[in-house]
Image (cartoon, grey):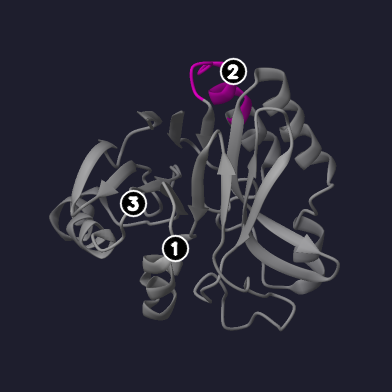
Amino acid sequence: MKIGLVSCLMKDNDTKHQLKQIEHYVSTNHNCDLICFGESFLQGFEGLTWEYDEDIKRALAKDDPIILHIRQLAKNYKCGISFGFIEKEEDIIYGSNMVIDSCGEIIDVFRRVSTGWKEPIANSKYKEGKGFHTFTYMDKVLGVAICGDLWDDCFFKDLEQIKMDILLWPLYVDFSIEQWNKSFQKEYVERTKKLPYPVLMINSFVEDPHRAKGGCYVLYRNEIVISLPMGNIGLLELELY
């Protein structure tokens, strides 16, 4: 199973741009079985206003035409796609990640369990998921955690007990490249060392110099196995046997 982790340009509230990015990477990496994008990728990390009446319009249900379009891309190119998005179910908004298989079927939706994605002004209609779970794709057992989920000690203890082959970790970090290389990179490696499986970290790239600068990393056993270093745009490929 070949997985591609994508660090690419993300624009807030520009789903047309994001869809073009998804199609570009899926269409030009036929050797990958699953291509993964970062946290809140579809609407952009700053895609919410925290005004509920506006945000419920921006959030997407699982049967939204945009989701159907991505499912068709996965089917057309015979490649699985994983991406973060702002989800709505009835009148509730979640920070979620969806995985679609190479036949265009939705095989997983994970809702962030930690509260750090919300601004203090968010009302009770912005909610978290109920816990972690796993799913199977191409005989591999996968799980998902979103950004701060790995920094909450209670949730982290749950992850230590779950059996899986890999953990997808879409996130958004906006450290400067200098800060990341000097200290934060080491902290992220240290944080994941107790997990008994590789952690696949996926960060997006934003043009604003004070925002996310991409980077994809495979973290396992207290080291960086392979990486697309922060500051770069592109696809990092790894193979699971």
Quarter assignment of residue 207: top left
Q: What residue sits 21% from the left and 45% below the top?
A: 224
Per the model, the C-alpha gap separating discs 2 and 3 is: 29 Å
Mark 3 Cα within 10 Å, few/some/many (few <14, many 20+)? some
Per the model, the C-alpha gap separating discs 3 and 1 is: 10 Å
The C terminus sits in image quarter: top left
Q: Which residues are magenta?
A: 22-32
**Mark closest to the chain's N terminus, 3 or 1:** 1
Residue 15 rendering spot, x and y as whole percentages: 69, 41
Q: What residue sits 75% from the left and 78% below the top?
A: 125
**Secondary structure of the residue carrying numbered label 3:** loop
Per the model, the C-alpha gap separating discs 1 and 2 is: 33 Å
The reply to whether callout 1 and callout 2 are in contact (CB within 8 Å) is no
123 in relation to 230, above or below: below
Q: What residue sits 33% from the left and 48% below the top?
A: 198
Residue 69 rendering spot, x and y as whole percentages: 78, 33
Residue 175 rendering spot, x and y as whole percentages: 30, 57
**Mark closest to the chain's N terminus, 2 or 3:** 2
- Residue picked out by circle 1: 162
Front position among marks 1 and 2 = 1
Instruction: Give the number of the disc on residue 27.
Output: 2
Q: Would you say residue 200 sits in the magenta stretch?
A: no
- Residue picked out by circle 3: 197
Image position of 99 (left or right of 180): right
**Secondary structure of the residue carrying numbered label 1:** loop
Mark 2 Cα within 10 Å, few/some/many (few <14, many 20+)? some
**Mark closest to the chain's N terminus, 1 or 2:** 2
9 in relation to 23, above or below: below
Q: What residue sits 38% from the left and 74% below the top?
A: 157
Residue 71 rendering spot, x and y as whole percentages: 74, 33
Instruction: Please state which of residues 161 and 151 is positioned toward the viewer in this rendering.
Output: 161
